[in-house]
Amino acid sequence: MYDVGHDHDLDYLVMEFLEGETLASRMARGPLPVDEAIEIASQVADALAHTHQHGLVHRDLKPGNVMLTSSGARLLDFGLAKWLSGPAGGATAPTLTGIGVIAGTLQYMAPEQIDGEPVSERCDIFALGAILYEMLAGRPAFKGQSASATMAAILLSQPAPLRRLLPDVSPALASVVDKSLAAMGSRARTDAR
């Protein structure tokens, strides 16, 4: 964000122009080759690490918030980001979402977010795991016929093992995805395998 203002009855935001396509647009054409998916996920992970080092959780990581440009993947839309312990400088950050309020995009939401529990960096890691799964498998890790069915899938099950869908995916890569999507906190999820 370069500037925010108001001029002649018009509110405006000045942001960087990025040329490219969203990851959602790219994924609409089908699964990504493993090397391309790993490269994108690595770049998003680097952006998240930077974000987390500065005390923020993105809370709405999804393919539509990743822009693929000629210089690499860029993480967008921090509109739902939340300070973990207050912004740099020690002041307490105001919050627009109340305690117990769900914020984010359902298919990529960690169980804590669905339950309205406090968020941590793990929520973003879970979302990145869900995105990587979808980039490789060509289908969402968690999906139901309704919002409540999708929530139940996230809360109570594991997605089909990546290596069952893609036997040629390396065990190491499948392990990274599995660990990203693993049960968090005290929640016991059943194994749908």
Image (spheres, rainbow, N blue to C red):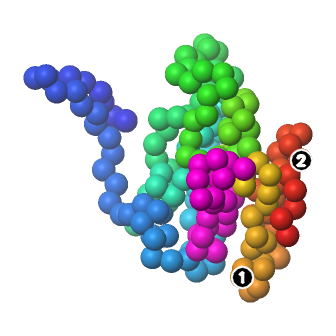
Q: Residue at x 87, y 61 (%)?
A: 191
Queried whether the magenta region covers residue 36, the answer comes back as no
Residue 166 numbered tag: 1
At label 2, the amino acid type is: Ala
Residue 64 in the image: above or below residue 9: below
Residue annotated with mark 2: 188
N-terminal-most mark, 2 or 1:
1
Identify which amino acid the numbered label 1 is placed on: Leu
Image quarter where the N terminus lies is: top left
Q: Percent from the top left, x then y, of residue 69?
A: 41, 63
Under tag 1, what secondary structure? loop
Instruction: Say few, some or many: other residues with alpha carbon within 10 Å of mark 1 (under 14 / 14 to 19 / 20 or more).
Output: few
Position of residue 160 measured from the top left corner of the image (x, y, whole percent): 76, 70
Q: Residue at x 66, y 53 (%)?
A: 149
The stretch in magenta equals: 128-152
Instruction: Name above or below for residue 160 compared with residue 125.
Output: below
**Residue at x-position 42% and y-position 66%:** 25
Dividing the picture into quadrants, the one containing residue 44 is: bottom right
Camera-side residue of 63 and 71 = 63
* 182 with respect to 34 (left or right): right
Q: Residues within 10 Å of mark 2 (few under 14, many from 20)?
A: few
Q: Disc 2 to disc 1, how far (Cα)?
A: 26 Å
What type of secondary structure mainly makes up the magenta span? Answer: helix
Residue furthest top in the image:
91
State the image quarter where residue 55 is shown: top right
Query: SS of the residue at dot 2?
Result: loop
Disc ID at residue 38: none
The answer to whether marks 2 and 1 mark residues whose Cβ atoms lie closer than 8 Å is no
Is residue 149 located in the magenta-colored stretch of the structure? yes
